[in-house]
Structures are given as C-alpha cells and as structure tokens.
Amino acid sequence: MSTPVALDISALPGPDTIAWRTLPNGLTLLARENFVSPAIFVAGFLRVGAQDEPAELAGLASLTATLLTRGTRTRSYDEINERVESVGASLRVVSATHTTTFSMKGLAEDVVPLLDVLSDILRSPTFPEEHVERVKQQHLTALREREHNTRARATLAFSEHAYPPGHPYHTPTAGHIHTVEPITRDDIMRFFEAHYEPRGGAVVIVGAISAEEALNVLEHTFGTWEPKPDRARVPVPPASPPGTTVKVAVSVPGKAQSDIVVGAPAMPITHSDYLPATVANTVLGVFGLMGRLGKNVRDREGLAYYAHSVLHRSPLNAPWYAVAGVAPEMVERAVTLIQGEIRRLGEELVPEEELTDNKSYMVGSLPLRLETNEGMASAILDLVRYDVGLDYLQRLPERIWNVDAEAVRRVTATYLRPEACVVAVAGPPQPK
Amino acid sequence: MENKLHDVRLDNGLRVLVKEVHTAPVASFWVWYRVGSRNEVPGMTGISHWVEHMLFKGTERFPKGAIDRAIARAGGTFNAMTWMDFTAYFATLPAQQIELALEIEADRMVNSRFEPDEVEAERTVILSERHMYENYPVFLLEEHVTAVALLLHPYRHETIGWESDLRTMTRDDLYRHYRTYYTPNNATAVAVGDIDGEAMIDRIARAFGSIDPGPEIPPVRFQEPPQRGERRVAVSGPGSTRYLHVAYRAPAATDADWPALAVLDTILGGAKGYRGASPNSRTSRLYRALVDGGLAAGVSTSLVPTVDPYLYTVTVTLLPDSDPQQVEEVLFREVDRLRQEAITARELEKAKKQMRAQFAFSTESISSQAYWLGFSSIIADVDWFTGYLGRLHGVSADDVQRVAREYLDATRRTVGWYEPDSSAAGAVKSEE
C-alpha cells in the first residue's frame, strides 16, 4: 500500500549546481545560487577542534573560537560588532571536536564587507586580555548551569563511559570547570598559532549572488591565507561498544524529571554500515512521531514527552543512542522498554511495509532539509567535510532504497546491543 | 516572491489564504484555530495544548499513528503548536503530495475521537512535558513573574497549564473545548508553495466545504486592570546561577505603538529573528551594559505580538560574583536612558536595517512564509506582516522615546529573582 515517493533528483544539489574551486592554500570554496530572497548565508569549517587540545585544558578550542570575534590587529571588539550588526547580519564561530565552524547570515548587498570581517577574525585575532577573562567567566557560568541540567548530565555521563579517557568523545567540547579555570591567554594564543590554517577547510556561500561572483569574492578574501604545511594532527584511537552493559546514575537533586541515554559508539559516516544504520535509527526513534520508541514509550505507555534516537555523523565511531525524559519513578520501566525496542530491531527483520515507509520518508524529506540557505550550506559543507563527493545527495535516494531488512537488523545487532551498551540516567536521587 | 495572495472565505466561515511560491518542489499546508491559553480559565489551564495532543490520537479514517505514518512516508514533516492566541497544525510535503495534508486536517477538525484510554495515556505525557520545563530554572521564574504581572487575563498562565489542572481535567472537558473551538468559522487554512493557487482554493473548498459551521465563539472578556506600582516575586530552587526576569506591561500587536516598541526593543535588546535563532546583539544597549560590563553571562529581551496586551520582558543570567542590586540598577538605568534621552538618528537607522534584514531571512523558506501568513491573520490581519516594514519606516526617534515613557515605567513592571538553593548544588554526585 505504500507508494515510493517520486523524487526529482535534479532538485538536489549536485556537481551541476554547486560551483567550486580549491585554492593553492588547501581551502575549498563552494557556491550555490538562490535568489528567492535578498539574503545570503556563508558557512565554513577549519580542521581544528577539541581533538587538538590537551585533555587537562579541555575547552581550550571552544574558548579560542569564541574569542576570535573579540578584536583583531586592525579592528576592536566594538568595531567588529558594529560592522556586523549595523547591517543586520550575524556572525558565529563554534568549535566542535574535529572542526571549528563559522557562519554569517546577511543581505547579499553586504557580502564584501562581511567577508572582510570574517577573514580578519579567522586570521588576525588578538585575544585581548580583558576579553579572555570575561569570556572565561561567561563560559564557566554556562558550565555551572550544565551541572544542573539533567539532559546534559545524562549525555555527559554516557560519553564518559562509552569512550575511553584520551578519546576526544570522552570529554565535552565545552570542557569542565576544572579544565577551563586554568586556561590562560598564552594557552589560547599558542593554540591559535599552532592550529588555525586554511588547509583542508571549506567555505560556501548560498544565496542571492551569482556562483561565479561568490567564488571570486571568496578567493579574493581567503587566497592570501598561508597554510601550515608542517602541522600534523594527532591520530584518534578507535572506540567500540563496551563488553557488557554499563549503568551510571547521576544525582541532580531538586529536579522534576530524569533524563535517560542508552547507547554505544557506532561507526564513522564513511563506513558502509552507516547508511543501513541511518535507516535503523529512523525506524527506532525518528519516523513519524519518534519511531518505535515514540510509539511505545510515549504513546502506548504514556511515560515520556520525548523518547527518540540519534545516530551522530562523524568521521570516527560516532555515538548512537536513544534518549527519553521520564518521571524519576519510571526510569527503570523506560530503560526496559528502550532496551526491548533495541533488542527487537537487532533480532527481528523490520516488516517490509514499515521499512518502505521509513525509506520513503528519508528520500522524500531530503528537499525539505535543503529549503533554507542555511540548510543548503550545511548539506554542501558536509559533502566536503566527509569527502563523500559532490554527487552524494543525488546518489543517496537510490542507496537508501537498496538497504534491506537484513542490513538493518545486522547493523543494529552489531553496534547497538542491550547487553553491551551504556545506560546513563541523570535526575533526582532514586529510591533504593 | 511577489506572487499574489489569494484570500477567500468559504460559506462555512473558513478563511483560506493561498500563495504560490515556486522556488522548491515543496508545499506547506496549515490550519490555524483561534484558541490558546487566552481562552482558558482557572481549573482548565493547559486545555488547548492538551486538545492539540489529542488530535494526533486518531479518527475513524486515520486511526492512531496513521497520520504520522502517512505524512512521513510521503516524505513530509508535520507538527502542531499551541500558543497564547492560537493552535496551529502543519505539514510540509513534496508539492505533489500536499492533498494528503488537506484530507487529514479536514478530517480531524471534526472527527477526532478523544477515547478515554487515550486521554489518560496523554495525561502522563503532558505532565512529563511540564516536568521537562520545570527542570529549567528560567521556566519556573518566568511562570511566576507572568502570573504576578497579570492579575486577571488568561495570558497569566503558561500554555502548558498548571499541574493541578492537568491532573484533574476530564475527557469531557477536553472534548467540549474541541467542539467549541474547532470549527471552520474559527479557523484559517493556509497553503504556500509549488502549487496552482486557483486549483488549491478549489481543493481546500472540496476538503473543508461540507463541514458545518459551529456556534459563535465565546468572547474573551478579560481586561487586565491597570498596574498601580512595582511588583516583586522571588523563586528559589536547585542550581548555582541567579536569574533576573523583568516584565513590563505592553500593548497588543494591533496597537499603533507596537512598531515603535519593536524598534525600542531592537535598540535595547538587539534584533530578533522573526522565527528561529536570534542574530547577534552585542551592540544592543543591554548587552553592552550588562555583559560587556562584566555583570552578566547573558541578557535577552522579548516582545511577543499578541491579540490582547501582554508583556515586554528582559531576562538576565548573572555571573556568580555579580551583585544583584547592581545588576538591577544598571538594567533600570539603561531603561531610564531611553525615557530621558532621544535615540540618535544613526541608532534608529541601524535598528531599521537590522529589522529589514531579519524580515528578508524570514521569507526564505516556504513553511516560514506560510507561518507568517497564518500567524498575522490570527493576531491582527495578513497585512500585519506584509506591511510591517512600511510601518517601521514611519517610526521616529520621538516615537521611541514616547513609548519608552509610556510603557517602561517603574510602576508598570514586575521584577522576579531566581535564587539558587546552594544546599542542593553541593549534593550533585555520580555513582556507578
């Protein structure tokens, strides 16, 4: 009774509609036109992140990224803000584990001066002392708020037990209070000098500007940026699911609800198991109203407002987990239900109709994610970030349709096993 | 972009707004009901939101789960939202599948079953949703401040409702609310996207035309009495961070003073995204005074367009060592400065440019365009949004000073503090 969605593949971005060139300094430039509104979105990433920071200074990459906008050799903090905000634009820089991403949203008429600011903060920041202290205090306040956030605490506990010490996913990119407190301006300057470079990075402009003009203005802006050819990143060790189930409970007194995270390290996005795992994850906790988890934990049992699952995209063993927020006395019941759904997916073949519905959703919803300049820019950047080819999205529908029920069962049984996963709970102390 | 807006009313009173936008092979269909927390009385708070949840629980034609499955397998996304003045349902789909959304919405406007078992299962889901919010200190603070700032008008309670009402409301209460407000004469249908405008009106008329109109909607007679002096409220709970939330009485969205207050808000608290993430606001007066001034980790302001007069609010996250008294003084000094001195011509122009840019971003996606058509038709009329920039253009520096004097008076404000209970903070621990 399900009819596969007919999707016009030419509506998806591909080699014909993404303009690109790579500069001698190793930076890839991309552009895609969209004249629906006078807006543009500029986004990019550099190959620098928390994986490059020493464990005892966790949070260093994050602080460095935040401080880029606090002053450059030619512009003060106030001048940067005024330049960006006076034209209604936005500028964000955020450091993740493997990359530091930046984005600008603005009107096409302001693209040249905005890119000039972007290039300036990425290449010539000065990290003024007073701002280092102020930003650090703001960062520490956020970390203190995190101490009392049940969802964040459950996720942190999951990461600490799913990944060994030394693995970049063991530690949150924001760091901990005791690792952020000792960070000095010298640490930040050293980190910047050692790691910020264009090599391997990418910048895309999506919006109301011709692709040719976009590439030219990007080349003019970033062409003179010197790479650091001697810089090498420390290789990251692989991670695998635990041998047995590890249970961890974090007590956050005074809260109304507990948060649960159940999962394990999975596979890199480039692994052949990744696509079948995406289909499995959609069945488990995404499709419709949060997949099978939504149907059983929320709808049938009324245990939770949210119960869904997430398979992260990453070049390493990305985490794959189910999450739910439930009443403290219902934690055990919810964990049993979640593990039951995971077990069923790893043991029984998904019925053909359910599988077709899920694949149909994944294919049909592709254009929806690409509706805004921001969504499009992010999708195009991922093609470069993970080196999957500019035709990846256009090939994706056929590859999704080719995933069969056995592949879904096999990847679940391989990576997400109830008898070998981390169960992390954060909330009010539980009655013994 | 500048395609014609079709605006017709069916014989049963349903208003139909249709706009062709051919930028992506996507269409978005919404039904907006004029019902929300504005229409709720004590004992029944949260009822509109709960009814919204029940509309996913099935009809004869689309039994429970069928709606989510049908839309998802057609490659669409869907959701619903309940707010102070409205409850809205939407689906965004590949354009050739949009008929499905019409059929679902027409069906559940009248045929939702509200089975007692399903009502009970949803009761715990909704309590769980409320408990999720309660886990956040700012929610608790805001809930209390709003309840103190407004003595009478139903806007004084959150759309989620008070816990005791959520525990005691009955199936019949919910069903009566549904039958009262879910009528074609109390609704607006909006379709935007890659569609034929005339044909879409015919299709909507076919799907909804046979639904009988309901009785007249009970009027909302509550008129908030004037505020006769500053009000104060203190909330304490788990955490390690202090928050300040201040609410001033503000006018309705249709008030002639609204555009000047929106400009004032942009200068005081920064430009706002009309939907989605807010842009940078580091040049706003409050960010400079409180965050750059080293007193706060963050500050945000909010002016919500509403049918009846509501509130203009400021929320401050304090740094651990900040003196609360000093934070208040600095905040109120900045507010007073707007009352005492006229803003400069440059500030005015900058605010207008920022708002123009945000407006451009808001028209980027098809679902966002549909949202704004429906939203403005509820809180005022469609020209509230389409004519927004024109009305802003007319705002002068004198207007801004005049509304600052009128609305940001100390006797019209409610000041709320969240005091972290430090005894709970020390108890955070992890165990295995």
Image: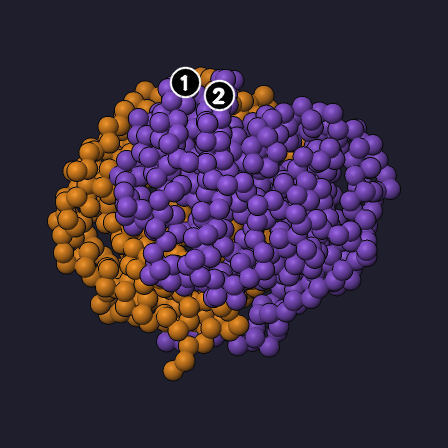
User: In the depicted view, which residue is nearer to us: A37 or A235?
Assistant: A37
Chain A representation colour: orange
> Which residue lies at the image location 12% right of the left edge and 49% below the top edge?
A406
The chain letter for the residue carrying disc 1 is: B
Q: Report, in whole angstroms, how far the alpha carbon at label 1 lies from the one at label 2.
A: 8 Å
Percent position of residue B415, x then y: 73, 58
Residue at which label 1 appears: B198
Chain B representation colour: purple
Q: Is residue B79 above or below residue B158?
A: above
> Which residue lies at the image location 61% right of the left edge and 33% below the top edge?
B380
- State the SS at label 2: strand
Percent position of residue A144, x then y: 56, 64
Q: Is residue B140 above or below residue B405?
A: below
Evaluate whether residue A237 shows in this view: no
Label 1 crowd bin: few (<14), some (14–19), many (20+), radius 10 Å: few
Residue at which label 2 appears: B6
Percent position of residue A210, x then y: 46, 17
Which quadrant is home to the C terminus of chain B?
Answer: bottom left
Evaluate whether residue B53 shows in this view: yes
User: In the depicted view, which residue is nearer to us: A380 or A176?
Assistant: A380
Disc 1 residue type? Glu
> Which residue lies at the image location 71% right of the left edge and 51% below the top edge?
B224
Tag 1–tag 2 contact (CB < 8 Å): yes
